[in-house]
Amino acid sequence: MLDQSFFVSQEVHEKEVTLADGGKHVLYFKEIPAVEYQKFRLAQQSQDEDVQAGSLAKLIAASLCEPGGEPAISYEQALLLKPEPMNALFAKIMEVNKSQGNG
């Protein structure tokens, strides 16, 4: 049997997100399965610009959560994020899922 460290945990990770204006926000993130990350990578390579542009919003919607693990943002809401906060959220998602970004 594989060790549990091979699998996504159900733990919610609390992270402080700092924006360019200096604002600090405590947010919560779930780990994402490798399959979700692979979907993101494939969407980034899509010839369809809407699929490509929406890939980051899907990843954020899959990871950003409330303290109890419930989704904090829908895909449609994530599509409306400003570029700088979107990039800050992506950085925290990669931090929470640090072992998945190397594939």
Image (cartoon, grey):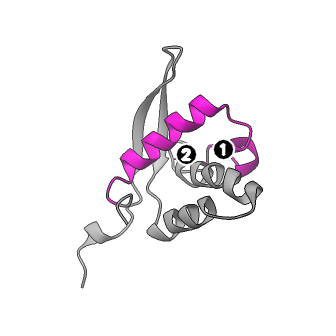
Amino acid residing under circle 2: Leu
Instruction: Farthest residue to the bottom: give it.
Output: 1
Q: Residue at x 75, y 62 (%)?
A: 48
Of the numbered discs in the image, which one, if any, rests on residue 73?
1
The span shown in magenta is 71-99
Vertical order, 44 against 80 (above or below)? below
Q: Main secondary structure of the magenta part?
A: helix
Of the numbered discs in the image, which one, if any, rests on residue 28?
none
Vertical order, 17 against 2 (above or below)? above
Q: Which of the image's four quarters has the C terminus?
A: bottom left
User: Horizontally, is 31 left or right of 59 in the view?
Assistant: left
* The magenta stretch spans residue 6: no
Q: Residue at x 42, y 59 (%)?
A: 10
Q: Where is residue 36 drawn, in percent x and y?
A: 53, 65
Vertical order, 23 against 80 (above or below)? above
* The magenta stretch spans residue 90: yes
User: Horizontally, is 1 left or right of 7 in the view?
Assistant: left
Q: How many marks?
A: 2
The residue to which callout 2 is attached is 64
Q: Where is residue 71 drawn, in percent x and y?
A: 61, 49
Comes first in the chain, label 1 or label 2: 2
> Do the residues under discs 1 and 2 have CB atoms within 8 angstroms?
yes
Amino acid residing under circle 1: Ile
- Name the residue nearer the viewer: 46 or 5: 46
User: Horizontally, is 11 left or right of 63 in the view?
Assistant: left
Q: Which of the image's four quarters has the N terminus?
A: bottom left
Q: Where is residue 39 drawn, in percent x and y?
A: 57, 67
Q: Residue at x 54, y 62 (%)?
A: 41
Q: Residue at x 74, y 38 (%)?
A: 80
- Name the residue nearer the viewer: 49 or 91: 49
